[in-house]
Amino acid sequence: MRRQVGNLKRVYASIKESFRIFKDYVTSRTAVIIRNIIIILFLFAVVTVGVSLIVFMVFRKGAPEVTVPKVTGKELMEGLIVLQNKGLRVVIDPRYFSNYPKNFIVEQEPKPGSVVRSGRDIKLVVSKGPIISIVEDYTGKTLAYVRNRLQEIFSFQGKNIQIGNITYVTSDAPKGTIVGQYPPPNTPIGSVDKIDLVISQGKEVKAFHLGNYIGKDINDVMQIMALKGVLIHVVPENVEDPQKNGIILAQEPEEGTLVKRNETVTFHVGYLPSEMNKDKLYARVINFDLPKNLENGKEVEVRIVVKDKAGEREIYNAKNKAGDVISIPFKSYSPTTVYIYIDEGLYEVKKFE
């Protein structure tokens, strides 16, 4: 019995010693782990704070500072180059101004002399040109220029000004350039809905070989003849075929004949019986040579007015020099009277039957 009790005590003591050893081991290992965790957390905190300080300092410093240069009063492209060289960006605010030309820099924000960071937006108020309230002078311009210009300057005003009648005349001006217009320059645009143009076809064609125009529409041929300065005489012929109505059946002189300016070409034109007794609208041409003895060769204002059953209307209004040759195609009913004015004085009257 005593032996058993002694054995139990030894076993208990052994277990107790083992537990103590385990407890000391665990306690010592835990301290090391906790210490390591604390060190790691401390190092992490130090690194985080250091990185944050570096980032803060970088962002606090930001882009380099620049002084905003003055670009008001400059042309837009010049101003853009100046600002871009400073590392500044541009925002454009286009507006119409009556007293500044197109692409002129009127205002800027920030103001000149302001100190800003590189990359800052600079707002520029840029002129789109004057608000047009009068008809411009298109002399020397081309038809394409006028079309583009009308669309550009009037579209924003809600107006719809179109190209009206186009007349081609012989002139010393380069071919395709405008030598006259109606309404004239400086006319208020309030009541204007179209602009008639007179365009140079180059120097006078003095003579040409007549083509074969049989089978062609008389209106088309008369326009061609008008540009060559030829007088046209139409002889109506009765036809039954509707396809021959208004078609040239014969011509005098024949094809290949040398025809000079102001000579007459006769066309026999077919018309249906129902058309023979009606007043027909003819394509005509008025040829006029300005006198060569005008005072000192100065420019004069030439106006040509047509009067027929449809009323009175102006078909030409332009400045011309002494000796200029004018050939104006137009349409009118028979009979027709043409009045030619030089500097508002009646110079000549022509009649067409």
Image (cartoon, helix red, strand yellow):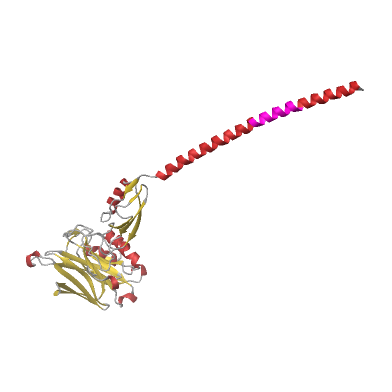
Residue 158: x, y in percent?
35, 68
Residue 148: x, y in percent?
30, 60
Residue 176: x, y in percent?
23, 58
Query: In the drawing, does residue 40 fall left or right of residue 77?
Result: right
Residue interval drawn in magenta: 19-31
Q: Main secondary structure of the magenta part?
A: helix
**Is residue 145 or residue 152 the one in the foreground?**
152
Quarter occupied by the C terminus: bottom left
Count how many numbered circles sit on residues in the image: 0
Occupied quadrant, residue 239: bottom left
Residue 153: x, y in percent?
30, 63
The reply to whether residue 195 is in sight is: yes
**Is residue 283 or residue 258 the one in the foreground?**
283
Q: Is residue 234 above or below residue 173?
A: below
The reply to whether residue 248 is in sight is: no
Is residue 27 highlighted in magenta?
yes
Quarter occupied by the N terminus: top right
Is residue 304 highlighted in magenta?
no
Query: What residue occupies the far top of the structure in this picture?
Result: 3
